[in-house]
Image (cartoon, grey):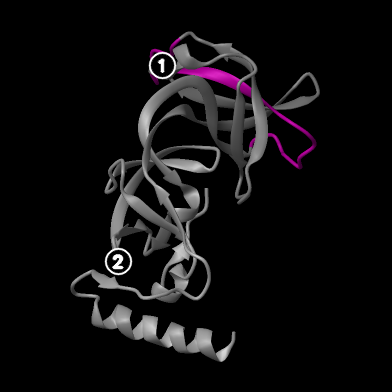
């Protein structure tokens, strides 16, 4: 980091500390280019939560998952899914191979089977959590995922209004591609800082992950 960036970083840190009570401040310039995005109303594809276990059927490993009864009407064979198996931190790509729409009287849920795409070291009996992406869409306030920051298990964005910047806590919903739904904290039309000096302003934040 050059001397100018270090100096700016120190100024931003001091500014952040001085402005922590009022939650907003003015910025003259950032070290690096600024990227601003506008929150927009968009149609976003929904996703269905599922959980279950890895099974082996006819020599092929599949993911047998439980689906809430109200979600089965949106399920179709061939739909794509992302599954977390065991303690793995990265998801496995899969697709819906079979659906049992009958509802269990005990759990109020239905069953579906997901087939992993590609070769993965999965073992029968491992626990599975998954998201199944449907063709159903909903209108939602959407912002780039790159704008979402984490601190203390909570999610935030930096909102820009003229030359004022402030941190705003948000609640998020479904994600689609490079965008994520915001269910609270941001309105359509708000200008959101996505990159460019953001971590000089808020060094105790980190980027959110999908």
* Marker disc for residue 51: none
Q: Is residue 152 magenta?
A: no
C-beta proximity under 8 Å, tags 1 and 2: no
Task: Estimate the x, y position of residue 102 in percent, counting from the top left.
Answer: 48, 8
Task: Estimate the x, y position of residue 203 in percent, counting from the top left.
Answer: 43, 75
Tell me which residue sits at (55%, 91%) in the image.
3
Q: What is the residue that sits farthest to the left in this orientation?
A: 22
Q: Is residue 111 magenta?
A: yes
Any part of residue 203 in sight: no
Tell me which residue sits at (48%, 29%) in the image.
47
Secondary structure beneath label 1:
helix
Give the crowd class for mark 2: few <14, some 14-19, many >=20 residues within 10 Å: few
Task: Estimate the x, y position of residue 14 in percent, counting from the top left.
Answer: 33, 86
Q: What secondary structure prevails in the magenta region?
A: loop
Mark 2, residue position = 163
Q: Relative to 9, is 83 above or below?
A: above
Any part of residue 195 in sight: yes
Q: Relative to 113, is 13 above or below?
A: below
Q: Relative to 32, is 54 above or below?
A: above
Q: Is residue 69 left or right of residue 101?
A: left
User: How many labels, in total?
Assistant: 2
Which quadrant of the structure image shows residue 69? top left
**Quadrant location of the N terminus in the rendered image:** bottom right
Of 121 and 12, which appears nearest the observer? 12
Q: CA distance from mark 1 to mark 2?
A: 49 Å
The magenta span reads 103-125
Q: Is residue 102 left or right of residue 62?
A: left
Q: Along the polypeptide, which appears first: circle 1 or circle 2?
A: 1
Secondary structure beneath label 2:
loop
Mark 1, residue position = 69
């Amino acid at each position: 980091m050059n001397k100018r960036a270090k100096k700016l970083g120190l100024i931003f840190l001091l500014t952040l500390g001085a402005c922590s009570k009022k939650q907003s401040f003015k910025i003259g310039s950032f070290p690096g280019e600024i990227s601003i995005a506008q929150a927009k109303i968009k149609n976003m594809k929904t996703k269905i939560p599922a959980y279950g276990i890895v099974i082996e059927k006819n020599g092929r490993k599949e993911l047998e998952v439980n689906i809430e009864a109200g979600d089965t009407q949106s399920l179709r064979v061939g739909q794509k899914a992302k599954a977390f198996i065991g303690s793995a931190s990265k998801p496995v790509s899969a697709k819906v191979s079979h659906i049992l729409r009958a509802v269990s009287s005990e759990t109020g849920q239905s069953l579906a089977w997901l087939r992993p795409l590609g070769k993965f070291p999965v073992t029968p009996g491992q626990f599975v959590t998954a998201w199944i992406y449907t063709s159903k869409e909903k209108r939602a306030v959407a912002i780039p995922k790159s704008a979402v920051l984490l601190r203390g298990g909570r999610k935030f964005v930096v909102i820009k209004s003229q030359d004022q910047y402030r941190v705003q806590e948000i609640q998020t919903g479904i994600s689609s591609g490079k965008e994520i739904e915001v269910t609270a904290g941001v309105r359509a039309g708000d200008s959101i800082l996505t990159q460019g000096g953001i971590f000089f302003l808020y060094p105790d934040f980190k980027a959110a992950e999908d």
